[in-house]
Amino acid sequence: NPLAGAVFGIYNSANIRIGELKTNADGYAKSGLLPYGDGYYLLEEKAPEGYVLDAVPHYFAVAKQQEDGKCPTFPNGVTVWYQSADYT
């Protein structure tokens, strides 16, 4: 079931909060563009009403699409949707 109202902080590898995600009625949240790199993580800061806060950081990386056209996968449960960006 989609959960609305969850708030996640986006943190970089220096543990600095650089953004925020808030899930909508469909349980979807979208960030702005992030520079390529490792060590990012999401940390739930507010759970939807009636749910327990997940205090475990969920690490992810921002990476270029692979040569075979596939996107890297991350086994920690964070789904990353890629949009085309003209970064070098």
Image (cartoon, rainbow, N blue to C red):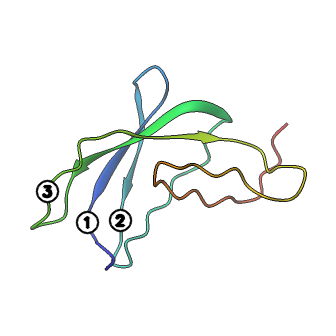
- The type of residue carrying mark 3 is Val
Instruction: Say which of 41 and 18 sits in front.
Output: 41
Residue 50 lies left or right of residue 31; in this view the side is left
Residue at the spot of label 2: 23
Residue at the spot of label 3: 52
Q: Residue 5 carries which label?
A: 1
Q: What element carries label 3?
A: loop
- Whichever of callouts 1 and 3 sits on the residue coming sooner in the sequence is 1
Residue 83 lies left or right of residue 53; in this view the side is right
- Whichever of callouts 2 and 1 sits on the residue coming sooner in the sequence is 1
- Whichever of callouts 2 and 3 sits on the residue coming sooner in the sequence is 2
Residue 76 position in % (x across, y down)? 47, 48
Q: What element carries label 2?
A: loop
Q: Residue at x 23, y 42 (%)?
A: 55
Q: Which residue lies furthest to the right in this view?
A: 67
Residue 40 lies left or right of residue 55; in this view the side is right
Give the distance between the C-alpha atoms of the residues marked 1 and 3, in whole angstroms: 13 Å
- The type of residue carrying mark 2 is Thr
Of the 4 image quadrants, the one containing the N terminus is bottom left
- The type of residue carrying mark 1 is Gly
Does 47 sit above or below residue 20?
below
Q: Residues within 10 Å of mark 3 (few under 14, many from 20)?
A: few
Residue 45 lies left or right of residue 19; in this view the side is left
